[in-house]
Image (spheres, rainbow, N blue to C red):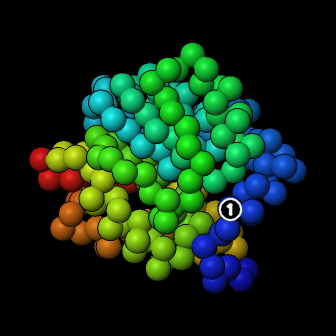
Amino acid sequence: MTRSPHTLPPDYFTDLYAANPDPWDFTTSPYEHAKYEATLAALGRETYPEALEVGCSIGVLTRRLADRCAALLALDVAETALDAARARCTACPQVAFRRAAVPAEWPPGRFDLVVLSEVLYFFTPEDLAHIAVRLAAALKPGGEVILVHWLGETNFPLSADAAVETLIALTRGALEPDRRGRTERYRLDVLRAPA
């Protein structure tokens, strides 16, 4: 399988959601639901004052994260996905949504939690380097980063392992691996900023 040499552009996701409003079966897949449970179980705190979710898609995980966050900023590049996420989270006034393409449109502010679930392999190593800089600067002392990525074959710029290991290497010194987990289908990594 040939990998894309470029970070996937916003149009890729816009077209994907235009063809299917839930392209990865987030709302119906038992696999996705089990992965969300594992993601929430990996969180080191019961609550987070300020959190950021990059690539929120249609907001299924966002809705679950909202119960643990006093303020949650959820980003995606596809407006159709954001519309679905907003509808799913109408009862969550602490959640704000923004259309943004990272790394160029990384939001200002500092966060206690950053969630990068199923997104890193869409980026080239060069863009991951920019994400690493922004991520390290965006975390408050003791802040956590949750990385969750499917291990299957794709034509994305990077595999899950390559993307996660690249980000870990690029943030070494600013963030340290705290916990790692792996199933047959996905890996889950938690990084932590020094307190």
Residue 124 location in percent, x, y?
54, 76
Q: Nearer the viewer, residue 20 or 190?
A: 20
The quadrant of the image that shows the N terminus is: bottom right
Report x, y in % for residue 77: 63, 53
Percent from the top left, x then y, of residue 178?
Answer: 25, 52
Judge left or right: residue 12 versus residue 94. Answer: right
- What residue type is disc 1 on? Pro
* 121, above or below 187, in the image: below
Residue 155 seen in the figure:
yes
- The image quarter containing residue 68 is top left
Q: Which residue is mark 1?
A: 10
Q: Of residues 168 and 110, which is closer to you in this image?
A: 110
Q: Is residue 170 above or below residue 87?
A: below
Which residue is drawn at the image coordinates 23% and 60% (left, top)?
A: 176
> Residue at the spot x=55%, y=28% of the render?
63
Answer yes or no: is residue 158 visible. no
- Which residue is more in the foreground, 83 or 6? 83
Determine the secondary structure under disc 1. helix
Name the residue located 56 percent from the left edge and 53 percent from the top edge: 100
Which residue is at the far right? 19
Q: Is residue 129 above or below residue 115?
A: below
Q: Residue at x 18, y 67 (%)?
A: 173
